Every structure is written in structure tokens, then in C-alpha cells.
Amino acid sequence: MSYRNRFPGTKLFSIVFLLLLATSNVIAKQAIPLGKVEHLFDIQSTPDSTLSLPSDIAVASDNRVYVVDSGHHRVLAYGPDGKYLFSFGKRGQNQSEFMWPLGIAVDKTGLVYVADKENHRIQVFNRDGKHQFSFAVGGKDGKPGTPIDVAVSAKSGLIFVTENSQHRILVFDADGTKLGGWGKEGVQERQFRYPGSILVQDGHVYIVDILNTIIKIFDERSKFVYTVGEWGVLPGQFYRPKGVAIDSKGSIYVSDSYMDVVEVFNKGYQFTHILATGKEKHKFHAPAGIAIDGRDRLYVAEMLSNKVSVFKLR
Amino acid sequence: MMARYLLLSSFLFITSLWISDNVEARSIAGKRECAICHIMWLGDFQRPDVTPLIPYDPNPVMNTGKQDVVSNERNCFSCHDGFVLDSRFVWQNKTYSHPVGVVPSDKVSMPTADEAQLRPDLNLFPLNKDGKIYCGTCHSAHGVDWKQDASPVFLRAKNIESSICLNCHGNRSTGPKGGNHPIRKKLENIPPELVDKGSKFGKGNIIICQSCHRIHGGRDNKVLVASNKNSALCGKCHSDRYAKDRVESTKMGTHPVNITSKKVKIPQEIIERGGKLGDKGEIICQTCHRPHLAEKNAAILVKKNQNDSSLCRTCHVQEGRINNTKHNMGLQDKEDKNIRGQKVSQSGVCSACHLPHNGAGPRMWARKITSEGEKISALCLSCHSKGKVAEHKQVGSISHPLGRNMSRLGEAVKLPGFTDAGLKKVGDMKGKVSCASCHNPHQWDPNNLDKSSKPGDPSDATNRFLRVANKGSNALCRSCHKDKADIKGTKHDVATMGPSAKKGNPGLCETCHLVHKGKGPRLWAREPVKGVDPISSICLSCHNKKGLGKKKTIGDHSHPVNAPLSNLGITSSTEGWIIGTKKKPDEKYKNWKQEALPLFDTKGRKTTTKDGQVTCASCHDPHRWSASSTPLKGAALTAEGDAKTSFLRISNSQKAELCINCHFDKGAVALSKHNLAITAPEEKNTIGQKAKDVVVCFNCHVPHNAGGAKLWGRGFGPGNDKAESMCRECHQDGGIAKNKQTGEISHPLQADVKNAGGRTKLPLFNKKGERSKSKKGGRVSCPSCHDPHQWDPADPLSQAGADAKVEGGANTSFLRMPAAPDGALCADCHRDQRWVKGTDHDLRVTAPDTKNLRDETVQESGICQQCHTVHNAKQALRLWAREPGLGQDINEQMCRSCHDEGLPAEQKVPVMKNHPAEVQAQILGRRARRGPVRGFTPLFGENGRTAHTGVISCPTCHNPHRWSPVVMEYGEGENLEGNSRNSFLRNRSKLALCSNCHGMDALFRYKYFHGKSSRKKHQLYR
């Protein structure tokens, strides 16, 4: 939705008023609407190291937090209050090893899905990090694909993967068998330019279309529903949208990794505010994947701060 | 009108705004693709009505300088974070990236437009507004060539095999001749771990800049692809030259890296030339090598090293002195070549023997190694061997031992040992002896390190590349052989010897030892005597009738040498000596303190094995006049040696500490009356020493120049063999033990033990008085039963016998084992008689209070000597010790010593007591002709001894020493009533007792003739 206001009519008073404003060059700027949240804590280390380029977060139904520590090619598990539990994975190409993982998801049964990007596969683990199975993400002409993020439908059990070598969404069944997909490179409704984070909730698939700078919403059968946000640097616009999450009231949260903000839209897809701590908008540091747990806690992966910051939304 | 104008103006203004807004909107849309990076081109920043989420700042001041925001790192990362493109590795190791925000140094040649390869019309690599390098210097989204293999990351120029790097760093591509690491050279084996870390190689595996450098995401300074701590990166490709420590370097034959040296200090010159050290000052590859901008034509060394080894000598200053010595191969043989085929004029003096890489062994040896054994010595022998360049300086077949553990010295010394890996060890008792322990091949004269030498120059013990000058007092030898230093001032010091010993002006040690080209064991410098063990041979080379030590010869009878120590019941091992065996030590001597004296093997080498043999050097330490803690020196030059001096290893006082160290079982003699210092202090041995003055052993034995077997040191008395003669030297009329003689009737000597029991544990002796087995002529002699060295066999430490007046008994008297009360000593030979123990004839059972002719009870005399007397007997037959009774023959008389009325066995007197005396029997047959036949009942001649023809006497039917012929066992210790199957009868005979003579009617005859009435009728009994 544009903020470019339209003049509503030809009322003389308004014209005169605006004319005066224009001639006097003192038009007042509209302030950025802010929504205050409370910073709880940061997740930034394990007992023996600090995080490196954390890229995404997933929160299980028991509020266990899984963080993709992408620089270390591993996944870290933390308790609901940020207490370190364990890690799994290391750099490599074997089972339970990762090469530059990026996105992550947890299904309703607690299985953890990791987009193992450079190994061109999705690896699935149980809640304790024990490998369950993997499935390949293909590209074009038999070449391997590039999985960016993964999401699992609580409703259908389908697995949705953003594959950005072909700018598309792939759909797999619960066993990892490819069922189909949609999208190609372009700017139209069902086209993408580098689809990034993906979220499935209440039958809707939310896809961050990074270079189209928009959140596209489909139903699980790939029927286009609506969009959120648009290109730009003004409130409600995106420059580098990366993460998307929805809170208990249906508000949509989108991180922008260049402008370092998290923008919030209501259930009607209208922009409402920018997250703030104190009197100013909260400045993140290259925020990427985000997640919201059942307690309405927001987790933001700040890649260049090498941390996950946790906020209480309300 | 005015209002009309106002309205028109407003309309025009609004319209203009509208038009303007729409133009701007179209403008933004048109620029959108550009604005993906050029964010500040967005017009919304200029909007007066709303606040953008980020401020408008097209040329922000950043750490790298003032530059267009499009080249901002954050802008790059917003796509290259993995979600669009993936360059996360750049930010993962952001510490090590190509520098930005710096002004290019003078080592960098920024290409001008003319030099640019592909864009000659443009300035190819722009700097930012501050003249500094920034991202945009190399990268531009508007790359000249978008093919992935040529410009995969928006580079401003093609990058085929690091070509873009060379635009600026062209001066690093000149190869070794230009002082740079080679590039575009094929690497045969690319280390996979390097590729894993991002290393890249060109087509055909050629080395390019990116083989070692990773412009973004490097892992070390200089944007190296992997950590180069301690030159680890160098070692990835040059693994054959990259030793992780000294040990590995010796194995690999390469210069050590990753080590620090106390001896070698890296001079400032090296550092100034670009040489580097590790974090802790370690020597690393880059200490000598500089991969870029090194000296030209110097193999990328920090300093040229050809011809004169100047680089080597920069650090190895001390070793550099070799230049002016015989070990400079250029002086020795200019045509000689190292294993690289280089003459010294090509390799330099150092590399004639050492190659910094790819050496043939430890110390980076540059010559062919043909010898085995100790590693460092093998290097020396690669020249000092037959057919080699230094064959005129060989060590000979007998030379100072190599490869011995330095720990054998028992203390740290200042000379070095060398490990099996070839590492030098000093002052820690580690390593082994090597040529280089004594020699420092890099310095000719240890007292004048700069002194030069050339081939053909004379040499002596002050130079010869020795580590310590060895002239005169032999300081070098004594560095290790400290325990030998006490020889100075003794009779074995050349200074005290005659003129012949001083010929050639030898040093203290060289008088007897030659370090190389020795003539015998112990590097002997003299002609060894043949026919004896190696050690004794060298002692005898002086101590013979014509030798330097002719006044101190050992005579024909001397302490045995070349004899195994095990003969004495001692087991030698590395832990010391054990009396008995390791598995079964002798409990009796478990507290005995023995000093393990040196033993030697058949080649004269010290050994601690059980087979080690005694030699002269076991008792004598030729380097120490006396064993006292402050050995006598000056006095020894003129004084005559005695048992405390004489180069003995243990001072030998009257208690004979040295002798009993081995002859531990003889030490008790000092506590007995055989210690003549107690019983005859003025008595002299054959060499005139009084008993009161000498070692107790020397009363009877002398270790050298003895009179006969047993190193006898006294005269000989009468006797059938030398052993008896030795005893009777004292135990004879007029002798000092004249009161202790054996009498006319005594236990037979020179008797064959076969006549008694057939075998014995007691020693037997031949005519010469030497111990000998029965089969080899060993016979019974005095020391068979007597051990003259211990008074009480049950208590060797008893002093009860240390008095001439003390009378011995059957369990003392120097007996080898107690004869009382149960007669063990006698029974050891008289085995058939041992079964008397515990029977009725053991008088402890039947008559404990009765006494023999010596007025001894059985407890005092023992079982045997109640009836038999060993010495001074009254009756020769059976050495009978009791008063004979009445009887038809002497045997019956002996039996009746007890078996008669009023005597101890009066209850055992036969009613019909004997066989007719007139009847004599004869044992016939072939076997009988050869003597009395076992198995047949014995007959007795007139002298009472067994005979073929004789009377039937008591012992014909009875064996008085064995209760039962059926069961071979001791008696039960009770006075039992006998029957026809025991009662000391011989009816175990092959032919039943009576039927031997009387045939099958013997029983009837027995019944008849042993009846009271019938016997009376028979003429033989009437």
C-alpha cells in the first residue's frame, strides 16, 4: 500500500492551506509509527564458542529454540529461557553434517527440518538432534537446487521449500517425496526473484520475495491470496525483506536486513508500526530469519551481531 | 479577479505537483533495478512529508573512508548473506580479507589506464574519495565480463588464474629468480585440505595467487587461505620439508622448523631482510625463506646462500668456523661431490655435508650413508671409511664404543649424547655415545676456536676436532669417565712407571687405552696376552714375568677367572645380585648385603646377565688404588699393597668383606676356631702373613701365588688326597690342631660313595683336593662331611665355636649338616641305613638314656653314633661304638651289645637264638663269583664282613636299619611288637629268607628246629 496521498477534493480551504504550506516550504514530516516491545535476552554463545552468522530460528511447541549457526555449519538447541542444551552438525557432506545451512523449521511433532543449502538437501532430525531422514532439493535439468528455507504445514503435513536457483517453491510430502511446486523468475503474482524465508500458518503460505521486496501469500494449493508490503524505504516498505513471522493475534512481522528494522502488519495486511525499544525504533544488525513462539516472544537472528535477540511482544 | 487568479494559480500548482509526483514515480520505477544497489537514488528520501526508515546519506563517512553507499559492506551483505547469493565465508573470517580503507602501499603498482588489460580506456581500479582502497576498487556490478569463469564476483577485470591480482601485485609474479614463490608451476599433489579451505589452482594444477591467498574469508594474515602459524601453510604443499619438531626433522633429513634454539640466535640481519620467527620465537620456513620480494636469484631465501653458505653461517656462527679447517671439503678434495652432485664450490662449505632439505639422514646429511648403528656416527663414517674421502683417518676395528646409553655413566656430563633420531642431548644423561660426543666437527682446536687447520697438518690430543683438549691429564676422557680419574698418582699412573711406559709421551689414559685402533678389549694400548679371558689378557699384558708389572704376577695357582658367578650360587641381573635364583632366592641370605661387582662376557664386555664371568676386574679396579672414599694416592707409589688397597674394589679387612661378597657362605669362618686370629694368631701362611694381621680367609687361602688347589695358603700334612692333606696340615701331631685328630680307626677316606648309598649331596674330592663327582673320581674326604668355614651348620652366624677350647658335638664341629639327633649327615651317603630312624633301633625310641662308648646319649650323639663312631673308634668293624656282648661271631657280639640280659634290648633276646655256627653256607652261581649278591641273605666271614662263604649270623636274617622289608619308610617312633613281616627281617629277599638255603621244606625245618624238644635231639644243637 502506498503512502503517496491523494488529494481528496477541491475544497477551497484545503487548496489554500496547501498552497500556503507549499509556498512557505514548512510541510511537517510524518513520524514513523512505533510499537514498543521488551527486550528479554540475547542468545549469543555456547559453552565453548560464540555464534557465527546465525541465519534462522525455529521454536517448537514446547518452546525449545533451534538456531541455525550457519558460520559453524551446525544447529544449536536452547531451552525456553535461552539455556544452552546441545548442538548437532558440523561442516561436511555426510549425514548430520551441513554446508552453509540457512533456514530451519519445526513441525507439530517436534521434528526439526534444516535447509542444508550447499548440500542441496533438507535434513530432518528428531527433537534431540538425531538424524531421521534427508531428501534432496533438485534444481533445473538435473542439477542440484538451492534450498533457502523450509516450512511444514501443521494442517496438511506438507513440506514447503524455497528453492532460489529457479526462483520457485517446491512442495514435498511428509516423507520428502516431491509433489510439485510453483513459481519462476519474474515479477508477476506467481513469480519470484529470490524467494527467501517461508512460513506456513493456518493454511496460508507466506513467502518473502526478496528482490521483489514483498511478502506473497498463497494457500497450500498455491493459489495466490494477497501481498504484504512493497518496494521502498518508507514505513510499510521493504528494501531487503528476509524473515517473516506471525504472532498469536495474526499480526505479520517482517525483518529488513538492510534497513535493520522489523515491520509489523495487521491481519488485514496493513502496516501498523515498526518495533521499538524505548523511544526509538529498535536498530537490529542485519536481521534475517525471525520466529514467534507460543508465548508471543519474537526471536530475531541478527547475522552480523552473531546473536539471536529475544523480545516480549506484549 | 484576484480570486480567479488565485484559483488558477492553485490549480496550476496542484497540477504541477501531480505531474511532478507522477514523473517522480515513473522515475523511481525506471531506476528500480539500479536502486537495488543504488538505494540513495530512491526519491522517497526527498519526500518532505514522511520519514524514511533510514536517513539519506549517499556518501557516508565509513571506516574505509568516504565513499558511495552502494559500495557499503552492508549493501553487499544484504544480498550476499546466503538468501540471494552466498558469500557468508567473507564475513565469517572477515578479519582476514583484502585490506580496504588503506592507501595503496609503494609495493603495489596500481595499473594506470595504459596498463589495464581489458579496459585501456578507463582507470581500471578506482579508489574511494579519500584515495583509499574500497570494495569498489575491485568489484563493480558493472563488470566487464559476466561469464562466471572470468569474473564470477562482479570484478572489474577478468580473473583468469589470479590475473586480476597481478594487475596490482605484478612484482610478486616473477618466480624464484625474481625473489618470489613460483606461480603457474604445476603442483603434482594438491593437498585436499587446502582445497577444502578454499584454495584454488589453475588449469593443469598450476599454482596461482589464490592457491595460497583467499581474498575474502582467509584464515591468516596476508589473506592466506589457511593458518600459517609456524609456517603451517607452507607445510601443506612442502610436507616433505615441514617437520613438526626436531625428531621429525632428523627423520626427514630437513632443517628443523617449529623449534627454538638456545644455541642458535637469529641475528637481526635476518629479521631486517624479512625473515620471520614464530609466535614464540620459533624458527619457521619464513625465517630463511621469503615467499615474495626476496633477494633475486636466491631461491626465495632472505639472503643468498650459494658458494659460501653465507646464509647458514649467519645463524650458525660457531659452525661457520669449519671454513678454515680440514673439514672444509674444499680444502680436503675440491672434486668431491655431495648427494646432489655438487662440488663444494657449488654447494658452499655447509652444504657439502648438510642440505637444508632432502638430506640423506639426520643432520640433513648431504653424503651417502653406508654404515649402520649409531646414527650420528654413521654420518662421520660416510667419510672416515675405506674408499671414502677420509679413509686415511679411520678408527680401526677396536675403537671407543658407540651407541652406549649415556645413562650408564650414572650422572650428567657436559659432553653430548645423541638419540636414535640423531638429536643432541646434553646434561640429561639421555642419548647415546657417538663420534660427535667427543668431536665437534666444526672446530679444530677446542681451546682456540678460530684456529685453522689444513689437510696434512699434524694433530694431537689438543685439537683433532675434540670438544675438550685431551692432553696430559686427559680432561676429555675424564669428562665422562670421572670414576677413572683416581688413577692419577697411583702405581697405574704412567708417571710412576718405568721409561718404557713413557715412550711416546702418552697421557694418563693413553698409556693403557687407545680411543681408536685399540689392540684389545678396553681399547687396550698394549699387546694382550693370549689364552685367557679378554679382561685378564689385558691385565696380564703388564703383570707377567717380563711386563711392566713383573713384580706383581699371580703365580700358577690364582683365583679363578673366566668362571661364571653362578658357580657360587649367585644370580646376577640388572637389579643386582641375588643369592639363589630370581625365582627362588635363598631365604637364609635374604638380608645379606652384596655389592654387585662387575662381571664380563666372553668378549670382555661388562654384563649383568647370569652368565657373567669373574675376571681380574671383578675384584680389582685398576683406576683406584683403594676403595676408601678418599683413595690413597701418593702413598701408593711406594707402599706395598694389602687387602685394603691393591686396587681392590672392596676394602678387605680381617672380616674379608671382598671375599665374602661372593663367597657369602664362607664368611662364618671368622666366627669359628678356624679363624686363626683367634686360635693361633702368630701362625703364618705361606707368604709369611701372620694370622692376626691378615684377612681371615688368607689364613688358609691366598688369591694369587697359592700353593695348590683351593688357593691353599698353608703347607700340606699327610693324607690320601690333597683335601685331607690340607686339613691335616693343622690336624696332625705337632700341628696347631694336634688335639683334634681322627685316630687310627676312623671313617674311611677316599671311599667310593657307591659302597654306601650310591649317591650324595655332600661334596667329593679327587686326589688333587678338587671337588669332583663320583663318576670322575670324586671320593670321600674330610671336607665331604666338614665345612671348615662354619662351626654350626644350623646357625652359621653362631660364635659358639670361636674358642679353641670349645668341644664340638654331633651337630657342630664344622659339619656340613647336623649329625644329631637324627643322623641326617650320615644318611646322606648311607641311604640304605636311613630307615632306622624312628624304629626300635633308633634309641631315642627304645633307650634314650643309654650311652655309647663316648658316654653320649642318643640325643648327643645322634642315632647313628650310638652304635658307630666316626673318628677315634675302638673297633674297625662297623666303627662300633658300643661294648660288644657275648656271641658266636663278632656280628652276634655287636647285636648283643644291647640284646642281652641287663642291656637295653633284653626283652628282645631270641629263645632259640642262633643258627648252628658250624654250618657255613655258600652262595653259588655266576653272579656270586663277582662278589656278594644283592637279594641273597648275607653270610659273614671270620672278620665279620660279608663273604661268599661264611657263618650265618644275626644280620644274615636281620637288617638292623630297616624295620620292615616290605615298606620303605621311617619307623613310627614307638616300640612296636614285631611279626614275621617286619622285626628287621630280611624276608623281602628275592628268595624267601630260609628257603634260600633250605628250599621248599624250609618251613617244616623251621618248625622242627625251633621247637624246644626237637632241637635238643639234633646233633647240631646238642
Image: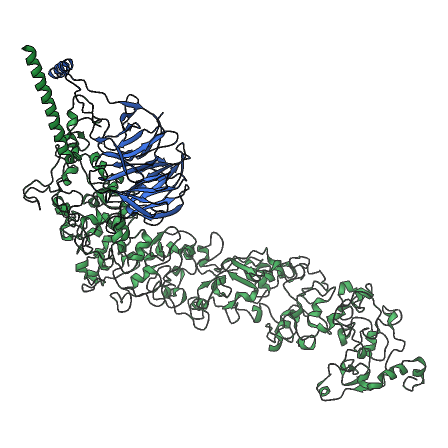
Chain colours: A blue, B green
Residue B631 appears anywhere in the view: yes
Q: Residue B619 or B17: which is nearer the viewer?
A: B17
Left or right of residue B831: residue A226: left
> Compared to B368, does B25 lie above or below?
above
Image point (48%, 65%), residue name? B616
Left or right relative to B874: residue A108:
left
Say which quadrant the C terminus of chain B sits in. bottom right
Task: Report which quarter residue B758 is drawn in.
Answer: bottom right
Where's residue B717, x and y in %? 64, 72
Q: Pick the quarter of the image with the N terminus of chain B.
A: top left
User: Which percent across, then down, holds residue B432?
Assistant: 37, 57
Image location (x, y in percent) of residue B769: 60, 73
Q: Quadrant of residue B185?
A: bottom left
Nearer the observer, B905 or A39 = A39
Apparent side of residue A305 relative to residue B643 in the rendered image (left or right): left
Q: B733 or A30: nearer the eye?
A: A30
Residue in the picture at 46% in, 60% down: B621
> Observer-nearest residue: B724 or B10?
B10
Task: Determine whether, in the image, residue B185 is placed left or right of residue B247.
Answer: left
Observer able to see residue A300: no
Residue B875: percent from the left, percent from the top? 77, 75
